[in-house]
Image (cartoon, grey):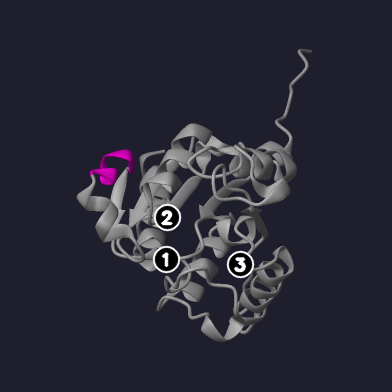
Amino acid sequence: MPLTLHPSPLTEKKAVFLDRDGTINEEKNYLHRIEDFAFIPGVPEAIRRLKEAGYKIVVVTNQSGVARGYFSREDVDRLHQHIQRELTKIGTAIDAFYLCPHHPEKGKGEFKVDCDCRKGRPGMLLQAAAEHGIDLAASWMIGDKRADLEAGRAAGCRSLLVRTGYGEEELATGAGALAEAVVDDLPAAADYILGKAVSSVEQG
């Protein structure tokens, strides 16, 4: 009998990678204080819907405020813990957070680095894929900036541009051409992704 190789379940996971500021929460310059955090309306429920559909939710965020010395990585971690606490109130959570604390010009000391993790390079997405067994070709990147779309494309994901945050400004620069679609916000992105998934099942 021929040997049948079954793919490892570790290689079958699909993810939705989310930018943070302007995609999950309202854009505020160098956000790091819990009291300044506010979800964009409908975002927690959109995250829950995507998770219920089988997607891992991974946040990938450039935090040059750390590089510039405006706040610490511990400040960022505390804010992410707050996000998780708020999401648990509706029975969901983010699976992993990745942050880039570097800036190639404005960074101070060890953080002045021309790194591979700062979006629009794909380092954070590639690291998450390696650590969580994510199939990048079956995954999505959602954000409000050209750099998010560039990172998603470089990692081999499909990408969506949201109009929240800096999305409208980025549209004016032609960034929408890098996305599969432009949507109003993360809830609309979830509708788009889940609609595509249903269509794929029906075609199959």
Q: Earlier in the sequence, mark 3 or mark 2?
A: 3
Q: Which mark is residue 70?
A: 3
Task: Name the residue that disc number 1 marks.
Answer: 22
* Label 1: which secondary element: loop
Q: Nearer the viewer, residue 61 or 91?
A: 61
Q: Are the two marked residues, 1 and 2, in contact with CB atoms closer than 8 angstroms?
A: yes
Magenta stretch holds residue 21: no
Task: Name the residue that disc number 2 marks.
Answer: 143
The answer to whether residue 97 is seen in the rendering is: yes
Q: Residue furthest left?
A: 172
Q: Is residue 165 above or below residue 202?
A: below
Which one is closest to the eye, mark 3 or mark 2? 3
Residue type pointed to by label 1: Gly
Assign the N terminus to one quadrant of the image.
top right
Q: Is residue 55 above or below residue 43?
A: above
Report the magenta residues as a range.
174-179
Q: Give me the C-alpha separation between circle 1 and circle 2.
A: 8 Å
Mark 1 packing: few (<14 Cα in 10 Å), some, or many (20+)? many
Q: Nearer the viewer, residue 172 or 82?
A: 172
Q: Give me the C-alpha separation between circle 3 and circle 2.
A: 23 Å
Q: Earlier in the sequence, mark 1 or mark 2?
A: 1
Residue type pointed to by label 3: Tyr
Assign the C terminus to one quadrant of the image.
top left
